[in-house]
Image (cartoon, helix red, strand yellow):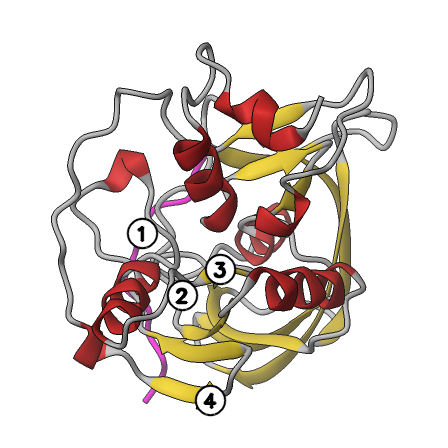
Amino acid sequence: MRLDKFLAAPERLGSRARAVTALERGKVYVNTIEVGVADSGRRLAVGDIVRLWMDRPGSARARPRIGRAGDLDVVFEDDDLLVVNKPAGILSVPLERKTDVPSVYEQIEDRFRSHGKRRPFVVHRIDQNTSGLVVFAKHAEAQKRLKLQFARREPDRVYLAVVYGHPDPASGSWRDMLVWDTKALIQKETHPRDPNGTDALSEYRVVESFRDASLIEVRLRTGRRNQIRIQARLRGHTLVGEERYVYGPDTLRTIDFGR
């Protein structure tokens, strides 16, 4: 069966339009790999696992349109793609469980609509409280090619973060086997033989040290959800301001930067 027909079945999304929207917004995964509109004609094989990161059909509430197209900080644009500098606090892509939070995707939708264009196509995303560059495609073929580049780890993805404590050594790599908890909606460490586990690899270096914290640069070699947040926490260096990946004695506390 084709992927789009599978998604459009009455017991799933209920219509082809909803299936296409889910594919456009990057909410569909086949065997842990995100798929898009260009994959709609893909033939599913026996044993394939299809996952939807959205509420079931009919449960979504109307989303307020927060944020204007003019608020977009467009860094680069051509006939195939759009690169936006996303500020912290807004989503890359809408989430049904966060209907009151605006997204860059919706702002681009408004921008495209005003120019008589179609919807944008999701290529990747960054966390709500992370600022940085997000790439969107303008058509399905561009989305397919860009996603392939990300799958091959060709884009150089570099982030800055402030963490509690001082990583030792001051530079190195973090490698973990992670699994996404679909109920708690967080990443968890798992054993290497877990069939649902995915490899997570990051390279880091301390840029500046303070009395109680460090500014680190992290270069992603894989792109797991919340990767930097969970990997830093697993080593006892929770990100400052973190609210989800905080365990045991960790608490949000004031940082003395020694200045």
Foreground residue, 174 or 36?
36
Residue type at the position of mark 1: Leu
Look at the image and tell me whether residue 79 can be seen.
yes
Locate residue 160, reporting x and y percent.
Answer: 51, 76
Q: Nearer the viewer, mark 4 or mark 1?
A: 4
Question: Which residue in the structure is indicated by mark 1?
Answer: 252
Q: Residue farthest to the top?
A: 11
* Quarter assignment of residue 146: bottom right
- Residue at mark 2 to residue at mark 3: CA–CA distance: 20 Å
- Nearest to N terminus: mark 4 or mark 1: 4
The answer to whether residue 209 is above or below residue 229 is: below
Image spot of residue 210 (x, y percent): 45, 80
Sequence-earlier tag: 2 or 1? 2
Label 1 crowd bin: few (<14), some (14–19), many (20+), radius 10 Å: few
Measuring from the top left, give residue 166's x and y in whole percent.
58, 69
Q: Where does label 3 land, which residue?
A: 121
* Eye-nearest disc, 4 or 3: 3
Q: How many neighbours does mark 2 have within 10 angstroms: few (below 14), some (14-19), or many (20 or more)?
A: some
Q: CA distance from mark 3 to mark 1?
A: 37 Å
Residue drawn at (39%, 72%) of the image: 131
Identify the residue shown where x is 75% and y is 59%: 151
Instruction: Tell me the magenta residue range.
Output: 248-259
- Comes first in the chain, label 4 or label 2: 4
Asked if the residue at tag 3 contacts the one at tag 2, i.e. Cβ–Cβ closer than 8 Å, the answer is no
